[in-house]
Image (spheres, rainbow, N blue to C red):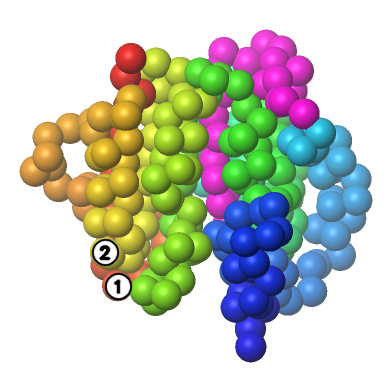
Amino acid sequence: MSSDDRPEDDNPHLDRPLRSFGRIKARPIKPRQAALMDTLLPAIAVPDPRAGPLDPRAMMSEAKEVWLEIGFGGGEHMAAQAARRPDALVIGCEPFLNGVASALRHVEEGDLKNVRIHADDARDVVDALPDASVDRVLILFPDPWHKARHNKRRLLQDETAQAFARILKPGGTLRFVTDWLDYAEWALERLDRTPGLERIGAADQDWFVPPADHVVTRYEEKKLGDTTPVFLEFRRVD
């Protein structure tokens, strides 16, 4: 039995959601990155979201916008977006420790002062953020859980879609990207029926065309899914 199929994950008596991600560590972390885990990460870590509500202003008082990237992988996309918009607070969530270590290297090399990292489940951060406090939510290539019996583990569920709508400011946007066609259809169905969200663009718009500001990462170049990337964009409306 794999760690992702543990029976306790499905125990209704445990007060935690099913894991929406797979492994949290793979190969050994390189010494330089391991050092950053000990030095840089504590300095830019998001305060413990389980300790109480999060105030983005306390993380970066001068921020003109607040962005939330969920599952940043190796951190390439997050770092590139943060470098483009140094006036935006970019909160990144990623439970995969090798990815966190890689992202820290990008943060250090780019001397990025506007990145904050939560090395754990993004749903804790979402739950702790105030209503209408985020300008952008970015969800790129989440674990697909493409076996039907594992669909319940997908990050994008009705309740998480509603949570994203809650934290988005009016006019704020949500971008969902996947390279699994059935997950794209699954996500579109749930986002379409979420009160307060409307799709950006026409219904027949080519969803394989990346937005102008999209950053291609090494993960995307591996083409591990069953389709070229699908891009869904939604806006928070009153």
142 lies above or below 25: above
- Residue placed most toward the observer, 158 or 206: 158
Which residue matches tag 1? 226
Please provide percent x and percent y for residue 65: 54, 18
Q: Count every numbered label the image shows and give the total.
A: 2
Q: Is residue 132 above or below residue 178?
A: above
Is there any visible trace of residue 88 in the rendered image? no
**Mark 1 neighbour class, 10 Å CA radius: few under 14, some 14 to 19, many 20 or more:** few
Direction from residue 217 to residue 96 in the image, left or right: right
Please give the name of the residue rendered at 72% of the width and 25% of the height, measured from the top-left corner.
53
**Relative image position of residue 98 (x, y in whole percent):** 71, 63
Q: Position of residue 90 (x, y in %)?
A: 60, 31
Q: In percent of the image, x 67 and y 11: which residue is there? A: 62
Q: Which residues are magenta?
A: 52-75
**In what element is the residue under mark 2?**
helix
In the foreground, 41 or 13: 13
Residue that numbered label 2 is attached to: 181
Say what amino acid the circle numbered 1 marks.
Asp
